[in-house]
Amino acid sequence: MIIQSLAGRWEFRQAGTQDWLPADVPGGVHTDLLALGKIPDPFVGDNEKRVQWVAEQDWQYRLMFRPEHEFINQPHIWLVCDGLDTLASISLNGVHVGNTANMFRQYRWDVKSLLQSDSNALDIIFHSPVRYAALSQAIRPLPGVSQALPGGPYLRKAPCQFGWDWGPQLPPEEFIAEVMKEIIRDRVAGTEENPGSYLLVFWFHRMMRHVALFPARGVATVTAGIVWRPDEQSLTAHNLT
């Protein structure tokens, strides 16, 4: 299996601002801000209250990358995202590829027509889970634990991230999952042979994220889902295959 890892140095910024900041991949919004000294350690003292603004904002991640030469001539190149947490919009070279609204599932798109042989720009915008939860809660209140931010049950997102009696209210905007390349290889074993197909893959280990491009033997069908569209402030059914 050939893997082109895109892990390493990315850029990120608060949506709507001009300045790009360095980001380490794997990583996430809170950890990147903490590494840059932009926020205090949220697990020290009452710093949890001082960093609430982070989850109330949208954040954009960007990577410029070049695919290896043998990839670009293949008939299919799939962008596969596992564990995007949670509300995200993905674009490649300025073209919107898809949205996500569930940190527990996989999303996949064929990006063959968008991938360039030289430089490519991959953008991921994470939308505020706090704003989404508040908007949903205002329409129809949904009960949750008393120590949590209201509206959390409306998202397919780990409930403890919104707060619990044992944990802080720090809903992250990042990549969380545990799908390594060996698991992906097992998943495609026994499917129809597609030697010309490549998967551009995000795989993650706990709080870490990775991106890679590698050949695959077939692609499993992705089911339809409910997509959050931040520009329309709406939830819609969407076929993600």
Image (cartoon, rainbow, N blue to C red):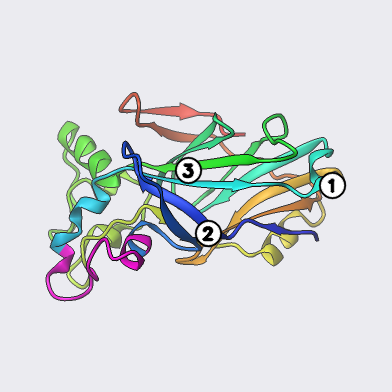
Q: Secondary structure at mark 2?
A: strand
- Residue denoted by label 2: 9
Mark 3 to mark 2 CA distance (whole Å)? 15 Å
Give x and y (percent) for residue 241. Answer: 62, 34
Secondary structure of the residue carrying tag 1 is helix
Q: Is residue 53 left or right of residue 100?
A: left
Magenta-drawn segment? 32-48
State the image coordinates of residue 122 (x, y, percent, origin top left): 56, 42
> What is the three-letter code of the residue carrying label 1?
Glu
Image position of 229 with respect to 20: above or below: above
Q: Residue at x 45, y 66 (%)?
A: 207
Q: Position of residue 152 (x, y in %)?
A: 25, 49
Task: Report the disc number at residue 7.
Answer: none
Relative depth, front residue between 76 and 11: 11
Query: What amino acid is found at the position of numbered circle 2 in the picture?
Result: Arg
| Sooner in the amino-acid sequence: mark 2 or mark 1 | 2
For marks 1 and 3, the one nearer the N-term is 1
Q: Which mark is residue 70?
A: 1
Where disc 3 sits, the SS reads strand
Give the crowd class for mark 2: few <14, some 14-19, many >=20 residues within 10 Å: few
- Residue 44 in sight in this render: yes
Residue 67 lies left or right of residue 99; in this view the side is right
Q: Percent position (x, y) of residue 192?
A: 84, 45
Residue 241 lies within the magenta run? no
Q: CA distance from mark 2 to mark 1?
A: 24 Å
Q: Residues within 10 Å of mark 3 (few under 14, many from 20)?
A: many
Task: Mark 2 vs mark 1: give the one in front.
Answer: 2
Quadrant for residue 29, please give it: bottom left
Q: Residue at x 51, y 54 (%)?
A: 10
Q: In this picture, is 56 found above or below 40?
A: above
CA separation in Å, label 1 and label 3: 25 Å
Which disc is residue 124 wearing? 3
